[in-house]
């Protein structure tokens, strides 16, 4: 098992939701966590609450990510990375009026892929480089572990999710080749694909609750949305279990999304 005590960890999108849960779970295991986000107030509050640090960074910006990786290294040997940063956008591929102008905005598609997929790879390549410079922690030559966050939308994306599903599908698709690349430096990589989780992304109030009730129809059992701590538990297991590598795990209560 990978011991996180006294090590540093980087969590992108760590200011809220699933990322925040991962931050708290890693800190509870003894890691010094660097929260990477663009939500300054929330990010600083989360980092302060676990005795970690906050670094403002766009995951697709190499210089900013390198600064975050460097900041983590100053807290201890960087051993773990969780890439939970991501954005979504709902838009159909073609418009109802049949005009070119109403087709899916290409700039939006590019933005979603840029943050979710390219940003994830950017963080992997830079954090793994830093991990590769550290001293191995065991006789196997292990230096660290990475968990990427995809989505079950990678497998059964709904109407209007072309950009989001493409970006998350890319994360799933690079799991095996990147894990093979990183084996040379003793770094493992796994991917978790969450289903429908109860996070702040859905908002609050009656409308939000009604929407979440609708989502529950696709969950097999238990008949509810997932809790952030349930995802965090899986993330910690994949990071610390020394034999978990190159795997994509759906964590979704058996959900299979309907077209809409």
Image (cartoon, rainbow, N blue to C red):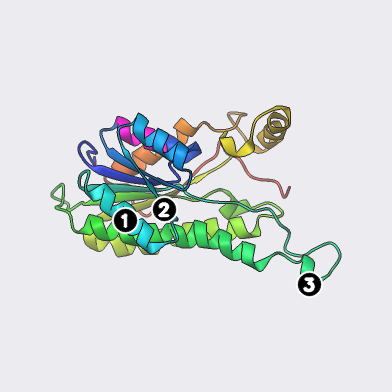
In the structure shown, which secondary structural element does the residue marked by tag 3 occupy? helix
Q: Is residue 218 magenta?
A: no
Q: Which residue is the extreme one toward the right?
A: 97
User: Residue 20: which quarter of the image?
Assistant: top left
Q: Which residue is mark 2?
A: 57
Residue 57 x/y as whole percent: 41, 53
Q: Which residue is mark 3?
A: 100
Closer to viewer: mark 1 or mark 3: 1
Residue 214 vertical placement versus 106 (above, below): above
Which mark identifies residue 257?
none
Tell which of 40 and 72 is nearer to you. Answer: 40
Bounds of the magenta span? 21-28
Which mark identifies residue 67?
1
At 57% across and 54% down in the image, what residue appears?
A: 154
Tell which of 104 and 138 is nearer to you. Answer: 104
Chain-order first, disc 2 or disc 1: 2
Q: CA distance from mark 2 to mark 3?
A: 35 Å
Q: Which residue is the extreme one toward the bottom?
A: 100
Q: Would you say the magenta stretch is mainly helix, strand or loop?
A: helix
At 24% across and 41% down in the image, what residue appears?
A: 2
Decide: marks 2, 1 in contact (CB < 8 A)? yes
Residue 206 vs residue 54: left or right? right
Chain-order first, disc 2 or disc 3: 2
Q: Residues within 10 Å of mark 3 (few under 14, many from 20)?
A: few
Residue 157 vertical placement versus 39 (above, below): below
Q: CA distance from mark 2 to mark 1?
A: 8 Å
């Amino acid at each position: 098992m990978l011991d996180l005590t006294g090590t540093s960890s980087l969590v992108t999108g760590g200011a809220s939701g699933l990322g925040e849960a991962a931050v708290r779970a890693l800190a509870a295991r003894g890691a010094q966590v660097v929260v990477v986000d663009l939500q300054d107030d929330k990010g600083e509050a989360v980092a302060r609450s676990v005795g970690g640090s906050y670094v403002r960074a766009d995951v697709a910006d190499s210089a900013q990510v390198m600064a975050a990786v460097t900041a983590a290294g100053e807290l201890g040997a960087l051993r773990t990375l969780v890439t939970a940063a991501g954005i979504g956008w709902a838009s159909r591929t073609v418009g109802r009026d049949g005009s070119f102008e109403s087709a899916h905005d290409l700039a939006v598609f590019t933005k979603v892929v840029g943050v979710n997929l390219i940003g994830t790879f950017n963080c992997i390549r830079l954090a793994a480089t830093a991990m590769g410079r550290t001293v191995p922690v065991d006789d196997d030559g292990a230096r660290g572990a990475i968990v990427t966050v995809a989505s079950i939308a990678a497998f059964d994306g709904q109407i209007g999710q072309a950009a989001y599903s493409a970006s998350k599908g890319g994360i799933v698709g690079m799991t095996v080749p990147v894990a093979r690349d990183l084996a040379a430096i003793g770094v493992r990589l796994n991917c978790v694909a969450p289903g429908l989780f109860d996070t702040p992304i859905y908002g609050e109030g009656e409308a939000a609750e009604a929407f979440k009730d609708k989502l529950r129809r696709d969950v097999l059992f238990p008949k509810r949305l997932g809790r952030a701590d349930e995802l965090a538990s899986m993330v910690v297991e994949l990071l610390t279990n020394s034999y978990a590598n190159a795997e994509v795990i759906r964590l979704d209560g058996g959900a299979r999304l309907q077209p809409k």
